[in-house]
Image (cartoon, rainbow, N blue to C red):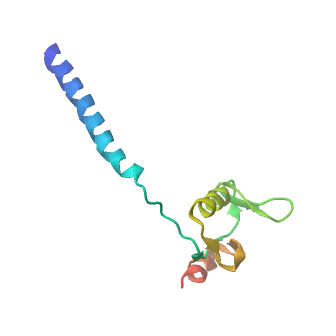
Amino acid sequence: MVKTFKLTKVLCLVLAAVLLAFSLTACGGAESTTLEGAKIKVGTSGLFGPFSYFDADGKLIGYDIDLLNKLQEMLGFEYEGGTIQDMEYSALTTSLTT
């Protein structure tokens, strides 16, 4: 019984290692994906800290804002209107669709 458990454990570890190796093969591609020149509409209500909220100067900050700015830096897109739009939550869905 103990041998069967050890064999099963070893097979599971080997299988996990093989799956990990196959899943990482797509990560090392030579081509990079960019959105250079693309304009993207982004909006938030700014009411859900720490994700997006206004600081004392009225500037949008938070985790979501930091993530969006890093993605913009990495992918090269621009915000439509030059900035992230802040508006009431109920208006976000209809305002951001094209």
**In what quadrant of the picture does the N terminus appear?**
top left
* Quarter assignment of residue 46: bottom right
- Please report the residue visible at 61 percent of the width from the left and 82 percent of the height from the top: 95
Residue 90 position in % (x across, y down): 62, 77
Residue at the front extreme of this rendering: 30
Numbered-mark total: 0
Whether 85 is drawn above or below 9: the answer is below
Whether 93 is drawn above or below 32: the answer is below
- Please report the residue visible at 28 percent of the width from the left and 35 percent of the height from the top: 16
In the image, is 80 to the left or to the right of 55? left
**In what quadrant of the picture does the C terminus appear?**
bottom right
- Please report the residue visible at 63 percent of the width from the left and 59 percent of the height from the top: 64
Residue 19 position in % (x across, y down): 28, 41
Residue 41 position in % (x across, y down): 61, 76
| Residue nearest the viewer, comparing 64 with 79 | 79
In the image, is 81 to the left or to the right of 71? right
* Quarter assignment of residue 48: bottom right
In the image, is 70 to the left or to the right of 1? right
- Please report the residue visible at 63 percent of the width from the left and 61 percent of the height from the top: 73
In the image, is 13 to the left or to the right of 24? left
Whether 15 is drawn above or below 25: the answer is above
| Residue nearest the viewer, comparing 92 with 26 | 26
Residue at the bottom extreme of this rendering: 98
Residue at the right extreme of this rendering: 57
| Residue nearest the viewer, comparing 27 with 14 | 27
Residue 3 position in % (x across, y down): 15, 15
| Residue nearest the viewer, comparing 64 with 27 | 27
